[in-house]
Image: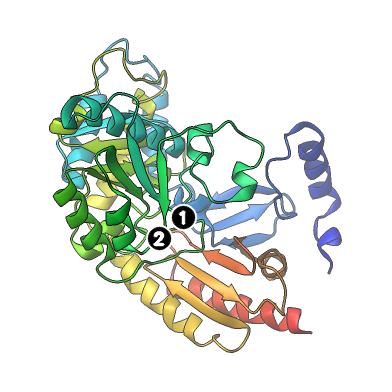
Amino acid sequence: MTTETMASVASSGYIALDETYAAHTYHPLPVVLSEGDGAWVTDVDGRRYLDCLAGYSALNFGHGHPVIVAAAREQLGRLTLTSRAFHHDLLGEFARDLAELAGFEAMLPMNSGAEGVETAVKLARKWGYEVKGVEPDRATIVVARNNFHGRTVSIVSFSSDPDAKRNFGPYTPGFRTVDFGDAQAIAEAIDDTTVAVLIEPIQGEAGVIIPPDGYLRAVRDICTRAGVLFMADEIQSGLGRTGRTFACDHEGVRPDVLILGKALGGGVLPVSAVLADWSVMSVFKPGEHGSTFGGNPLACAVGRAVVGLLSTGEFQERATILGAHLAERLEGLVGRGVVDFRCRGLWAGVDIDPALGTGRAVCEALLRRGVLAKDTHGSTIRLAPPLVVTSSDIDLAVDALAGALQDLAG
């Protein structure tokens, strides 16, 4: 079945509406989803698919997790929004619970992950001027090549992805880019204008790129010696995805600023947060930063439910055990259409032999076999199923990948 004929008549109608009225900023696979339950979704024609993208980790706990849905439903009937112009009865509890889970003194709630990163950039600059004593308007932040932190103008200003950056200038200055995984390059990029180093502990959009062992510890030590903030973007890698609560935990590293999002909203609504100790966070004063929806009662109710799920360690353990099974199964495909792969917990980047086709072609072949995945650069695909998957679900996904590769090989 060709890609053009995969969508039914019913699906084609929805797709046509999307393409007629919705801006073309995405290139979705030809499937129209209407229901979700755990690790599985159903399209408008009643076909079921194993979701191996999980909303880029926003659905770490699966579709419609009963604890999260119950928290949202209960809060919907009480109070959904006040704005931060007033106190409400859930913000303090959510802030406390999340801060204690992450091991920080304070948190600042926002909505999207990009807002979280923008907040961290502002926080680092203000800290640099008011605490470190950097000359006004000269602050610099060291970032990693092939990063993905969002798509606002400031963030794409330090992106190395031409699709994200082209024709959106003029760009925001103040960023220095070095190779990911090279701690010495970070050390050499720091000078008396540097206020922070901002990295993803694992680069997700780049293809689940895992840095060399000891890299995060080296970055932590470099930042400490230089007197700059270590800022970790754990929007995709955090909250159980890699088998630990945070990816930084794999090296026992605590950043100065932690940025969370995606799974923090339980797949129900956008929730993000920036965490730091008061020695950093206190540079923000009333009126200097905020958000109409940030920290709203509904978001806090959902966020507290997410923190509660993570507090038992169950999901971190599932990601560890099932991630090992995923890695073992993927190892069996190396040399059989898979060139290489990287896996940390339930998160894998799989490099397909380019001779077989693009990552998009592989995802289309997987779709025909009932598995949803997402390609990234070139012939790399990402597998990130919800943490509620089973061992048999993983077997199904890898078997489907093996079959898809055979399909492409002819």
Quarter of the figure that contains the N terminus = bottom right
Q: Are marks 1 and 2 in contact (CB under 8 Å)?
A: yes
**Is residue 348 visible to us here?**
yes
Label 1 sits on a secondary structure element that is: loop
The image quarter containing residue 183 is: bottom left
**Residue drawn where x is 26% and y is 27% of the image:** 135
Residue under label 1: 145
Quarter of the figure with residue 8: bottom right
Left or right of residue 146, residue 355 in this image: right
Disc 1 residue type (three-letter) = Arg
- Whether residue 67 appears in this view of the structure is no
Q: Which residue is mark 2?
A: 180
How crowded pointer 2 is (Cα within 10 Å; few <14, some 14-19, many 20+) is rated as many
Residue 211 screen position, x and y as percent:
36, 66
**Quadrant holding the C terminus:** bottom right
Amino acid marked by disc 2: Phe
Q: Earlier in the sequence, mark 1 or mark 2?
A: 1
Q: Give me the C-alpha separation between circle 1 and circle 2.
A: 6 Å
- The colour scheme is rainbow
Dot 1: few (<14), some (14–19), or many (≥20) neighbours within 10 Å? some
> Where does the image place residue 76, in percent across and percent down from the top left?
42, 25
The image shows residue 160 at horizontal and vertical percentages of 54, 51
> In the picture shown, does residue 26 fall above or below 337?
above
Q: Residue 355, percent across and down?
A: 72, 80
